[in-house]
Image (spheres, grey):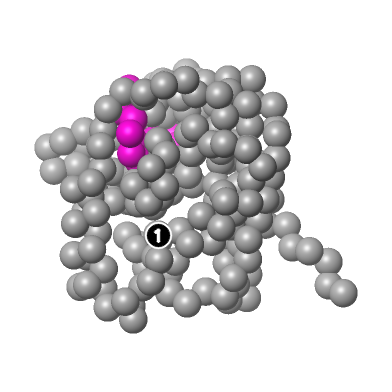
Amino acid sequence: MKAHGNNFSTLCELQRQMAQQVVLSSLKGEIRFISGVDCSEVQGRVRAAAVLMSWPQLEELGRSAFEDVCTVPYVPGFLSFREMEPMMKALEALKGPVDLILVDGCGIAHPRGLGIASHLGVATGVPSIGVSKSPLVGSFEEPGEAPLSSSPLVFQGRQVGWALRSRKGCKPIFVSPGHLIDLEGALETVKMALRGYKLPEPIRRADRLSKLRPPKA
C-alpha cells in the first residue's frame, strides 16, 4: 500500500473512501482456519508475522514472517500504511486458506472508521477483527473484574467495539469488527480464542514471532 508521500490529508481521504467499503454483518460460511497477524519494528525495519491455526481447536498449522524497511513514520490512525503490506506478504506465505483474520490493531474503532483490521479485511476480502491493548477512539465503562466481562466502546454516539476483560487482574483489551463480521461476532470470536493469556492465542503467537530476529550470519 503506497503512502502517497506521507501526505496525511490524502491518506485521510483515502481512509474515508475505503471505510465506505467496510461491511458489518454476521459471519458467512464455515470458519475452519483462523490467522493472527502482528508487526514489530527494530532499527527502522518492520517485521510482520502471521500464524495459521485450526478453528476452534487453535492447533497451530503454520507460521510465516516478512521483513522490510519502514518507509512511513509511526502516526496513530495511519498504522495500515506502515504495516499492512508486510502483513499481507506474511499472510500470502502461509500454507493454507484463511477464513478469518485477527489483527493486532483497530477495526472500525478508528477516527475515520478504517483501522488496520478493517483496511486489511477490505484489501483481502477476508473477515477480520481488530484487537488492541488501548483504544484509539471512544469511551467505555470499565468492565467487571470477572474474566470475559465486557462493556461497549462508543465513539460519536455509535458503538464501535468492546472493552473486554480477557484475564483476571489485567487491564481490558479492545475488540472491534474489521470487515465482514458484526459487533457480537467479533466479541464472541475473541472470547473463544483466549487461552489464559491477555491476548487471543493467534495474536499472542504472531506477536512473539514478530519479535524474533534471525541470527546474524
Counting from the top left corner in percent of width and height, residue 21 is at: 23, 46
Counting from the top left corner in percent of width and height, residue 125 is at: 38, 42
Image quadrant containing the C terminus: bottom right
As drawn, the residue found furthest toward the bottom would be 5
Which residue carries the number 1 mark?
80
Q: Residue at x 70, y 32 (%)?
A: 60
Counting from the top left corner in percent of width and height, residue 18 is at: 24, 54
Counting from the top left corner in percent of width and height, residue 204 is at: 61, 40
SS at mark 1 in the image: helix
- On the question of residue 175 being in view, the answer is yes
Question: Quarter of the image holding residue 7?
Answer: bottom left
Q: Residues within 10 Å of mark 1 (few under 14, many from 20)?
A: many
Along the line of sight, which residue is nearer the eye, 194 or 133? 194
- On the question of residue 133 being in view, the answer is no
Q: Is residue 155 above or below residue 30?
A: below
Q: Is residue 126 above or below residue 82?
A: above
The type of residue carrying mark 1 is Ser
Along the line of sight, which residue is nearer the eye, 86 or 131? 86
Q: Is residue 197 above or below residue 191?
A: below
Question: Quarter of the image holding residue 185?
Answer: top left
Image quadrant containing the N terminus: bottom left
| Residue 183 colored in magenta in the image | yes
As drawn, the residue found furthest toward the left would be 157
**Numbered marks: total:** 1
The magenta segment: 171-184
Along the line of sight, which residue is nearer the eye, 161 or 81? 81
| Residue 48 colored in magenta in the image | no
Question: Quarter of the image holding residue 47?
Answer: bottom right
Q: Taking 95 as reference, is 37 left or right?
A: left
Q: Residue at x 32, y 60 (%)?
A: 77
Q: Residue at x 54, y 36 (%)?
A: 98
